[in-house]
Every structure is written in C-alpha cells, then in structure tokens.
Image (cartoon, rainbow, N blue to C red):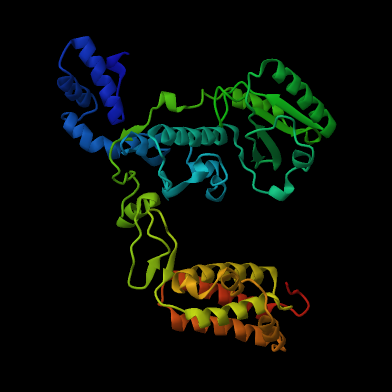
Amino acid sequence: MKIEGCRPTTLEGVKRLAKQIRKVEGIQYSKALDRASNVIGLENFKHARSNLSISSFATTRDYVLLTIYWIDKKQGHRCGRETLRVALSRPLLETCPKHLLKYARGIGSLRMVAEDHFVGDDVADSQEYARDQLCTAERAIRFMEDTGLVPFTGRTKVPPELSSDKLPGMDHSTYWLDPINSEFILADEPYGDLSGEEWHLQGERLAWADRHGWRIEKTSWAGMYFPYSCDLYIGVKSRSGYDLEGLVRKINAMPPPSVSGNWSGDSSTSLDTFLSPLANTSQDARRARCKGMICPLPSKTSVPLNYKAGCSKRRPLGELGLDGHKLAGRTIKAVIASEHITDGVFSRLCSLRAELENWMYHEVDRRLLDGPDFYEIYYRSTEEDKALKRSWSTRADTVTAIRQVAEQLKVAYSDCAPLRQQLRRLEMSASIIENTKQGASGGRL
C-alpha cells in the first residue's frame, strides 16, 4: 500500500491507513490514527470519528447509501448497523425510475428515505445477513447502470413458454426490459458446476431455445443472486434481432460483483439512526428511522393493531359495536352483490371489509361469536343481505347505502388517518357508481 497516495474517505479507511503507518514507521497505533486523520485534513482521530460518519459519503457527486440494521440473538443480542456506499456514474433514479426499483432484487426491499439514502425496515438477524443483502442490492444497481436495463413488471406479457414449457434448470430468474426498444430480457441464474449433470442440462436448454425461438448466452460475470455459485445466462427472443452479443459484452466487462466477504461498507455497533448528507430536516430524520425498530404507541385518536416493533398498522379509537359491525357488513356484502358496481368498487370494498373485520377482532369479545358467526359478519352471504339488496331499486339507493356506512364510521370512531383511508374508499366507491354509465357494470356474488 503506497501511503503517499492514500486519501481515505471513511472511518474504516482511516483505520486501514493507520495500520499501514504503524507498520512502516513503527509508532503507536493511537499516534498512527492521528497521523492518518491528518492526511485528510483533520486534527486527530477523535475529530475524524465525529465527522466522517456523516460527511465521508459525500466525496463524489453521484452516490447512494444503503443501510440495514441487525440484531443477532444467537450471539448475545449483538447489534449494529451496516451502511454501504455505492458510487454511481449518474443519479440512481436516472438509471431506474423509483416505481421500478421495488422490483429489483435487493434494492427492492429497501425504502428510499432521502435522495441519497435507502433503508431496510426489516431488522436482519445477523451482521453477515445484513451485509449479504446490501451487496445483493449493489449488484442489482451495477447491473442496471452498466446494461441500461430496468425491471420488467408486465407479468401478463411474459412470453408464455417461460411458464407453459419452462426452460430446463431455470432458477433464480429475473425479468428485465431494455427501455430503448422495449425488448424483454431473461436473466437466469441456476447453480453451476454440476459436472456431468450440467452438460446434460445444457443440451436440454439448447433444445428448448431452438424449439421456442430463443437465444441464450452464458456470461462470464459472476451474477446478482449468488456470485461464484450460480452462473448468469441472458436470453432474448431470436426473431427480435436484439443485439444479445452486445449486451453480453457489457455484462462481461463489469467489475467483479461485491460480496460480503470483501465488505467495504461502514459498520457500527450502534442502533442509532444513520442520517445521510442530504437528510437536512427533522422530517428527513424521522423518515430515516428503521420501522422494524420502532415500537408503536397509542395516540389521542388511534392505537396500534399490535404492539410489536415494526407494526405500522393502526386502528382508530372508538368502537362500532357488534350491532354496528353487523349492519356495516350486511350493507357492504349487499353492495358487492349489486349489479351497479365495477371492478374498482369491488376491490375497494373488499379492502374495506378486511380492515373493518380487523377492527372488529379487537373490539368485540370473541366469546360472543363462534368461528362461523364471526366470519359471517363481513363475508358469508345471508338471507338478510339478499333482502337488503332487493330493497334497493335504483343506483342511487346503492350510493346512499354506501354513504350511510361512512356516516356510521364517522360517528363511531375518532378522526384519524386509518379512518380517513376507509372513508376515502367509501366515497370513491359511491362516486364511481354515480358516474358509471348504465349497463357498464356487473354484480358479483
């Protein structure tokens, strides 16, 4: 390591440089830490420790930070935070739109909390697993940045042969789209090094490609899913004329994928919330908190559905009561069976009744209802439901019934976000029915 040319940008980098200085100059490690801190213009190691945790990541114009917290119960509840800095050639959202990132392996399980920061809300059960997840996310980012591909989300438009006559040995596959020409790309990552079995499987895969008109090429890059244990194959339809060879050349030219065994990120033994350089407001700080470590508390208008850390679902204070739930359930079931509703109304009312059943579960003593009676309130059709539906002679009657449920909820519960969400579902359902042309809908049984 050539000390003169080193200028570390992270706390771990300062420590590595200090070890080299200690070895070369034969000084105490504490003095070497101060000397290494001087290299980057800081007074001493204490100064470096208080500054680099925040500022060291902003050394390039384009980067993104990936953070996962962990608690290892098998090792005496050791805990910490892992943050990986990924240098980019351009902003991440220019490489892949935000709404598509959630479909990419690794990065899809993280939440964007700032322009330069993604956080995992699930607490990993070990430091190694946290690092593995972050490295997986980085590999997906590298793949998108170097190839120009983005995750493919049109599941109904996936070539039918990938499900009806599946590619032999297909495993850990992901679907991609070349946004320039809308070409569908298959990335398949089966386990490699299967000796004689692998040769036999390759023959079956080639036969499948010939049968369905596909071209499939093996890359030399170690892949996204499990580098050095799985092989990466890229496939496209032959008739498209897509430049598969050019895409494979791009992939083969990529640097070796990051793995947790060569961890280069920032590790902390603290569970304190990490803030990125672009987190400047108190709202940014709240957003950066890992939801998996937040213990929910009651408020003046709502309570958690349960008190486990990470639970974000809440219900309003108040009670509809058993009779109120029966009336609301009867109305919702009758509306769902109405000939006036559309698919949009159906999906909204199904979400509504699932939520109200959750609230009922916490409000009503289950000893008052056995299993069948409990599920009958919001799901099982009864003669009373059918009679109520028959009593509505016009579309306006159905709309009125929906808005009566909304009034029930307003009277029974405190005004809060969980209640307002259900009221929006009811009002939107009523509006859709009012504005739908006669004959353009159909009831559901």
Taking the spot 44% from the left edge, 73% from the top edge, the residue there is 363
Give the side of residue 118 with respect to residue 300, left or right.
Answer: right
Q: Quadrant of residue 312?
A: bottom left
Q: Quadrant of residue 166?
A: top right
Could you tell me if residue 88 is visible in this image? no
Taking the spot 15% from the left edge, 21% from the top edge, the residue there is 31
Give the side of residue 185 with respect to residue 413, left or right.
Answer: right
Compared with 86, 431 (above or below) is below
Along the line of sight, the residue nearer the viewer: 409 or 110 = 409
Taking the spot 81% from the left edge, 35% from the top edge, the residue there is 239
Image quadrant holding the N terminus, namely top left
Residue 185, position as x, y percentages in the image: 69, 36
Residue 160, position as x, y percentages in the image: 78, 43
Residue 393, position as x, y percentages in the image: 72, 89
Residue 244, position as x, y percentages in the image: 71, 29
Compared with 135, 440 (above or below) is below
Image quadrant holding the C terminus, namely bottom right
Could you tell me if residue 34 is visible in this image? yes
Along the line of sight, the residue nearer the viewer: 280 or 336 = 336
Along the line of sight, the residue nearer the viewer: 196 or 92 = 196
